[in-house]
Image: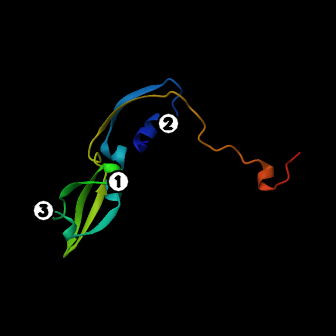
Amino acid sequence: MLPGLESVLAGLEKGARREGVLKAKDAFGNPSMQPLKKMRRSAFPKDVKVEPGEKLVAKGDNDMNVVLRIEKVAGDDVDVRLVHPLAEKDIQYTAEVIQVSDPRPPPVPAQALDLDEES
């Protein structure tokens, strides 16, 4: 679940409805915190402008789009940041709480921990 949406829904009761817009930074986090990947210049098509700030779309796992934002170019080495395709888009949402459950795991029975049960 998107972190921003989780905070909107936190503490709501079953049946509660919310709608609104999540700002991109609240929905996907700070893009500068996304992972960096070092690539070789030869991995890019010859006609692509390889310089800091440029963005390219590539196919990732499961044929999903991944945005590569070029951060740094040093000779044949190119540092790219892997950015979510919607990382700069605000997200409109409508949500209804259909069930509320306790996220804490149940306590571990004393016998599973080889402890004496209190009387």
Residue identifier under label 1: 61
Above or below for 73 versus 7: below
* Secondary element at tag 3: loop
Tell me the amino acid under the disc marked 1: Asp
Mark nearer the N terminus (1 vs 3): 3
Residue shown at 85% from the left, 49% from the top = 117
Give the label on residue 89, or none. none
Which quadrant: the C terminus? top right
- The residues bearing labels 2 and 3 have C-alpha atoms spaced at a distance of 44 Å
* Labels 1 and 3 touching (C-beta < 8 A): no
Q: How far from the left and from the top, in percent, is residue 70?
A: 22, 62
Q: Which residue is mark 3?
A: 49
Q: Residues within 10 Å of mark 1 (few under 14, many from 20)?
A: few
Q: Is residue 36 above or below residue 13?
A: below
Q: CA distance from mark 2 to mark 1?
A: 31 Å
Question: Quadrant of residue 8 in the image?
Answer: top left
72 shown above or below 66 = below
Q: Nearer the viewer, mark 2 or mark 1?
A: 1
In which quadrant will I find the N terminus? top left
> How many numbered discs?
3
Secondary structure of the residue carrying numbered label 1? helix
SS class of the residue under badge 2? loop
Q: Earlier in the sequence, mark 2 or mark 3?
A: 2
Q: Which circle, 1 or 3, is nearer the viewer?
A: 1
Which mark is first along the chain, 1 or 2?
Answer: 2
